[in-house]
Image: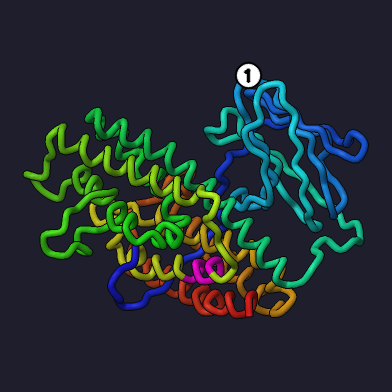
Amino acid sequence: MPRPALARLGAVAAIPVSALALAACVPNTQADGDTIAVSSTADACDVAATEAPSGTIVFDVTNDGDDVTEFYLLAPDGLRIISEVENIGPGITRQLVVQVGPGDYLTACKPGMVGDGIQAAFTVTDSGEDVISGDKAEQLTAAGDSYLLYVRDQIQTLEQKTAAFLEAYVAGDDDTARELYADARVHWERIEPVAESFGDLDPMMDAREADLAEGEEWTGWHRIEKNLWPPAEGYDLTDAERQELADKLAADTAELAARVNADDFTIDAFQVGNGAKELLDEVAAGKITGEEEIWSHTDLWDFQANVDGAAVAFGVLRDVTAETDPDLVEELDSRFAELNELLAQYGSIEEGFVLYTDLTEDQIVELARAVDALAEPLSRLTAAAVI
């Protein structure tokens, strides 16, 4: 959530980690006519072609399993959703029609609409045809729509992982709750500017103790964090108090999901570009200083997640920005790559990071400099893409 102004140290970037883990997916090499057949089952996502020419691509997705499934075309980072088709019941076939340019993508099935899903590489070759039709306004609208799909997917996963975390917490299984804490928060941190746009929900869900006004009730993630990593004796909560905190966080998370999934909720290109910069500001204001996760010291998970979200925001605006300022795109690509390599020295979201308190002062300064190197060009993204 927004923090008081602190000494600016910057923010860090990373290549977004996959929201749907790579798994066994055995595509064939031939498409059936003008469409590409997809068979989704409980343990497979069989796509009838590994490549297609750029332009309009049609996937015929059949659910050959027993549970409801979803199908996605994803950017190569595994996070940004190009397009999707949801709620495909057993025995049902639905089409996904998408217009895409040349490049590397991922196909993904999500049987049961839960879990990490099943991915495979998919290549779009250059057909020589124009992919984006219409004027710049249409491109920017498409960028906002693409980012909204990403936000909704992250919040769906946030609900699932928060439920598992709270179940362990209420049961008094503190070891499991501690293990689940940082991983669940990743999906909040990736879309934090959107969450913060709801001014009533954000303070209830993500306020730190230092943010509270006198007499203000403290709820949410960080209240539970302090209970799980107590700084001293005397910070225990009763079972009833734990249950109350868990019920509140679950209800607020459900409310956030309901608002973002409402038919009238939209995200425009200005919000996408500005949100990218806000995510780096989040790193500068709390993560790089170690003040965000002051008891658990899991700041690097949040750090990575904020930059994941910034990278996805840049990704949806990348093509339109390349038309107006190709040098900026080249610089941002380079800065993100440099930060990815730097952060990877300390772990990953999948495998875990070192605790922030394990970093030396020199390592923190190195991260801060890398953050600043990205923050400046990223601050120019909105103007380059939208104006």
Which of the two residues, 292 or 267, is positioned nearer the viewer here?
267
- Kindly identify the residue that appears in the image at 49 percent across and 67 percent down: 275
| SS at circle 1 | loop
Q: Magenta segment, which residues?
A: 271-277
Name which quarter of the figure residue 324 lies in. Answer: bottom right
The reply, left or right, for residue 94 in relation to residue 386 is right
Q: Position of residue 133 (x, y in %)?
A: 81, 65
Q: Residue 326 or 81: which is nearer the viewer?
A: 81
Residue 94 horizontal side relative to residue 277, left or right: right
State whether the magenta stretch is mostly helix, strand or loop: helix
Q: Is residue 209 left or right of residue 206?
A: left
Q: At x 38% / y 70%, what residue is drawn?
A: 284
How many dots with numbers?
A: 1
Which of the 4 image quarters holds residue 118? top right
Q: Is 285 above or below relative to 159? A: below
Q: Is residue 272 left or right of residue 165?
A: right
Give the answer, above or below, for where 351 lies relative to 75.
Answer: above
Across and down, in percent, residue 194 comes to 45, 59
- What's the amino acid at mark 1? Asp
Give how far across and how far down residue 56 sits, in percent.
Answer: 83, 51
Q: Residue at x 52, y 56 (%)?
A: 265
Compared with 180, 378 (above or below) is: below
Tell me if residue 113 is in the magenta stretch. Answer: no
Res. 357 visible in picture: no
Q: Residues within 10 Å of mark 1 (few under 14, many from 20)?
A: some
Which residue is at a point 63% across and 68% down the rendered structure image?
333
| In the foreground, 273 or 372 | 273
Name the residue furthest front. Answer: 264
| Screen quadrant of the C terminus | bottom right
Q: Report the residue marked by disc 1.
A: 66
